[in-house]
């Protein structure tokens, strides 16, 4: 019995969630006696302490509204009564009650956004405070749009509550965005955070400067004028412009000038100086930001202005005489325009009043000054001219001489550095004849091995270079004996020839040319006969004893390996002299080749030093032969019980060995000793052949071979194919060894032509005088060879029929007439059916 001061108990309370989801209504609690008040206690979780939530509840009520609770929390309640004496015992606890979830009542906090790239922004945040989640956090929604502009938000759903970051990508370069984040529970989406703004990083401009104009100001300066790119294509803070200039023929030699940006709306101007005069340049401009350069404007081709040329070069006096001087020069290194001519001045040194001037055309690079005074010093000045005027002068001094005479002959010739095709000659020059030398001439004489001397001829000549005492003589013939002699020349003429040098022999070298007239002839099915015209003796470039020929053979289709064959030439086997039409030749045989195959053959000559060049390739086929392979992909298929369809593909190309005239098909029963039948199919292509009138259900071996005009190739591997089943022939040797008055024993052998697998036999019989359509039939298994028929009438004539069965049905029948009697001589109509 409860105390008088205690509330009886709190019944399972009814509760009602108000729209806020934060209120419970506890119902139905009563008292046994008067009480002053009811304090209501509450606990949120099973392990949390109890808390007095309503310290005084009117004792006259039996329900109370509890507000200020947290959504998605579990609560329990209990009551106790209080009177003047004190507080009674608490009632039993209510069952656990969970409030519904609500959307979070606070947004995520600490939102931070930072530009990651020029098209992405990283956003990070922390979840809302836990008491304000109002349920189980399910994720976040991030929305963003261009800052400062009206328009719809784009949203991203982050479905993982553990994820507190998001990378916004595919954004516009260097653009400010407004970003907000909201959390959501199962009940819905909470409030969005305050907007944060952030720029994407700068990018490089995507458009070049506009309306770019490039103009040459003078011979070394180019002026650019342009408008900035559209602001939306700069993609960042404009750091300036780069003016690029490069020569037309040297695109890698770029001159770059950086220009600071001016007021955005104004037209910009920049100069590029220090360029080469009268040179064609390409000019282009670009805008750049901190990340890098934007695209260039389309290049403009222009040319700097002409200017006065630089000094002429290589001013010299190749010929100085007593009363004349030949002046020579070369074009200026810096022409700075189109050379229109040259100006030549000369005067006696120190006598300005004697200066004379002569203008020369632009093609003139030397001039003969005449009428000079002998043994006198002259000052010579030369300048080039363009439309801009004459350039800097080049000055030199020369003294005229005494009257010239013929030079003296060179002497003391010494030969050194002997190689296959050159030697070096050192010598002592003869007198110059009181004037400048103009030329050196070297003559050579070939001495043959037998001592015969050829005529002297000029082998080398060169213009005089001051101080020359050493000459390299090129273009000699290897392995050849030479003598050399020299002469020199000046304005008067050539000197006498000097004495000959000692006899020398150039070194050996590989042949310079291949043998000629290479011809091929098919010798056999596997060989080619090769003929060629050998080298002349002087073309060996070495000792004839060491000369040979090398043949290179390869298939035209590239299959197989390359072959090399060598043959040696007999001593003195080359052609003598150079007479055209000589019939001397050599030949060789190339063995081990594939039949009926196109080959390419080349030839080269070689000696002890090395090999010469290969000749042009000559093609020829080997002779035809029988095929070396059989047709491929041979297959056979039984079409019926007497027909087989055979198919095959052509012989492989490398095994044809000639023109395939057709195919021969061999057909024979397997294990038969009889020769196979042969069918001919004309034509080279793949073929088919239908064999008819074959034995039923018989295994055949089929082969195919190809043939050319020279014979048959090998047959293909046998293909075994069996004709299809058919109904069987009649059983063999049906006899009746035992005949009684009421029974007959039938004995037989399997059909001679079973035409398949025998599945059973059928014995039929009737009285001879009975209805021909009414037979008594008995079926026995395939292994049965006899059967006894009983229940017959004595002394009666009976007709018997016997037939076999395959999968295709019953075959032909064997018939016999039997008399049921015990007299042996009258049991059968035919004695051959009855056993003795």
Image (spheres, helix red, strand yellow):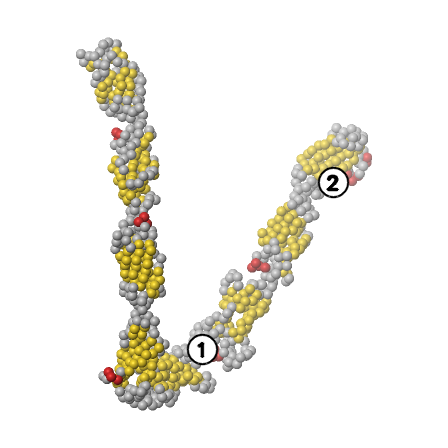
Screen quadrant of the C terminus: top right
- Compared with 417, 640 (above or below) is above
Q: Residue 389 location in percent, x, y?
A: 30, 73
Identify the element where label 1 is drawn: loop
- Which residue is disc 2 drawn over? 733
Is 251 placed left or right of 60 in the picture? right
Q: Is residue 246 shown left or right of residue 756?
A: left
Of the pair 13 and 683, the residue shown nearer to us: 13
Q: Residues within 10 Å of mark 1 (few under 14, many from 20)?
A: many
Tag on residue 542?
1
Mark carried by residue 650? none
Say how many tags the image has: 2
Residue at 31% in and 35% down: 140
Q: Decide if residue 408 is in sight here.
A: no
Residue 217, position as x, y percentages in the image:
29, 64
Query: Where residue 344 appears, x then y in whole percent?
Result: 30, 79
Residue 63 showing in the rendered view:
yes
First-in-chain label (1 vs 2): 1
Q: Quadrant of residue 256?
A: bottom left
Residue 593, compared with residue 413, is above or below; it is above
* Labels 1 and 2 touching (C-beta < 8 A): no
Pick whichever, 669 or 563, lies toward us.
Answer: 563
């Amino acid at each position: 019995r409860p105390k008088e001061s205690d509330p009886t108990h709190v019944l399972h309370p009814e509760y009602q969630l108000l729209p806020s989801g934060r209120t419970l209504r506890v119902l139905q609690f009563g008292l046994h006696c008067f009480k002053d008040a009811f304090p209501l206690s509450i606990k949120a979780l099973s392990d949390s302490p109890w808390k007095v939530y309503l310290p005084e509840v009117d004792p006259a009520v039996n329900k109370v509204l509890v507000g200020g609770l947290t959504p998605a929390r579990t609560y329990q309640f209990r009551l106790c009564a209080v009177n003047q004496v004190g507080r009674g015992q608490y009632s039993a606890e209510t069952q656990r009650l969970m409030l519904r979830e609500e959307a979070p009542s606070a947004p995520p906090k600490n939102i931070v956004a930072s530009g990651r790239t020029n098209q992405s922004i990283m956003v990070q945040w922390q979840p809302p405070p836990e008491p304000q989640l109002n349920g189980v956090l399910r994720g976040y929604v991030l929305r963003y749009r261009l800052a400062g502009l009206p328009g719809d938000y784009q949203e991203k759903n982050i479905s993982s509550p553990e994820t507190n970051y998001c990378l916004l990508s595919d954004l516009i370069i260097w653009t400010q965005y407004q970003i907000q984040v909201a959390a959501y529970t199962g009940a819905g989406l909470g409030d969005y955070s305050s907007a944060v703004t952030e720029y994407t990083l700068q990018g490089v401009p995507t458009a070049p400067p506009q309306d770019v104009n490039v103009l040459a100001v003078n011979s070394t300066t180019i002026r650019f004028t342009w408008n900035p790119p559209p602001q939306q294509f700069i993609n960042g803070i404009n750091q300036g412009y780069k003016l690029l200039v490069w020569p037309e023929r040297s695109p890698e030699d770029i001159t770059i000038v950086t220009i600071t940006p001016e007021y955005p709306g104004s037209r910009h101007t920049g100069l590029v100086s220090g360029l080469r005069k009268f040179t064609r340049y390409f000019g282009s401009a670009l805008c750049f930001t901190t990340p890098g350069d934007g695209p260039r404007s389309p290049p403009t081709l222009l040319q700097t202005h002409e200017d006065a040329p630089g000094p002429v070069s290589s001013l010299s006096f190749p010929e100085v005489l007593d009363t004349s001087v030949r002046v020579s020069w070369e074009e200026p290194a810096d022409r700075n325009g189109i050379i229109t001519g040259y100006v030549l001045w000369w005067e006696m040194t120190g006598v300005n009043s004697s200066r004379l001037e002569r203008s020369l055309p632009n093609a003139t690079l030397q001039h003969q000054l005449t009428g000079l005074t002998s043994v006198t010093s002259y000052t010579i000045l030369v300048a080039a001219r363009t439309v801009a005027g004459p350039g800097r002068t080049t000055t030199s001094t020369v003294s005229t001489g005494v009257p010239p005479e013929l030079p003296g002959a060179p002497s003391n010739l010494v030969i050194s550095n002997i190689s296959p095709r050159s030697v070096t000659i050192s010598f002592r020059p003869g007198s110059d004849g009181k004037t400048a030398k103009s030329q050196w001439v070297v003559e050579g004489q070939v001495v043959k091995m037998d001592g015969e001397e050829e005529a002297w001829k000029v082998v080398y000549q060169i213009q005089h270079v001051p101080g020359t005492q050493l000459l390299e003589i090129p273009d000699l013939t290897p392995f050849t004996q030479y003598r050399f002699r020299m002469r020199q020349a000046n304005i008067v003429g050539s000197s006498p020839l000097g004495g000959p040098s000692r006899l020398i022999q150039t070194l050996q070298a590989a042949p310079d040319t291949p043998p000629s007239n290479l011809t091929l002839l098919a010798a056999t099915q596997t060989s080619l006969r090769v003929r060629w015209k050998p080298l002349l003796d002087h073309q060996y470039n070495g000792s004839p004893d060491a000369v040979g020929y090398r043949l290179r053979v390869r298939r035209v289709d590239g299959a197989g390996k390359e072959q090399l064959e060598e043959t040696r030439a007999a001593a003195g086997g080359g052609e003598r002299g150079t007479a055209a039409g000589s019939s001397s030749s050599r030949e060789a045989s190339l063995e081990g080749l594939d039949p009926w195959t196109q080959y390419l053959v080349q030839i080269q000559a070689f000696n002890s030093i090395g090999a010469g060049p290969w000749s042009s390739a000559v093609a020829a086929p080997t002779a035809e032969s029988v095929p070396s392979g059989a047709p491929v992909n041979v297959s056979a298929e039984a079409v019926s019980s007497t027909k087989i369809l055979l198919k095959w593909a052509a012989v492989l190309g490398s095994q044809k060995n000639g023109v395939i005239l057709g195919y021969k098909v061999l057909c024979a029963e397997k294990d038969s000793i009889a020769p196979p039948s042969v069918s001919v199919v004309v034509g080279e292509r793949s073929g088919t052949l239908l064999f008819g009138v074959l034995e039923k259900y018989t295994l055949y071996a089929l082969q195919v071979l190809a043939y050319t005009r020279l014979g048959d190739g090998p047959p293909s591997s046998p293909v075994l194919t069996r004709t299809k089943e058919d109904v069987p022939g009649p059983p063999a040797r049906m006899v009746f060894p035992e005949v009684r008055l009421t029974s007959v024993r039938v004995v037989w052998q399997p059909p001679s032509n079973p035409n398949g697998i025998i599945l059973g036999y059928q014995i039929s019989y009737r009285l001879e005088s009975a209805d021909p359509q009414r037979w008594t039939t008995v079926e026995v298994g395939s292994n049965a060879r006899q059967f006894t028929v009983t229940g017959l009438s004595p002394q009666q004539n009976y007709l018997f029929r016997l037939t076999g069965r395959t999968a295709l049905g019953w075959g032909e029948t064997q018939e016999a007439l039997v008399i049921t009697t015990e007299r042996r001589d009258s049991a059968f109509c035919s004695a051959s059916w009855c056993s003795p």
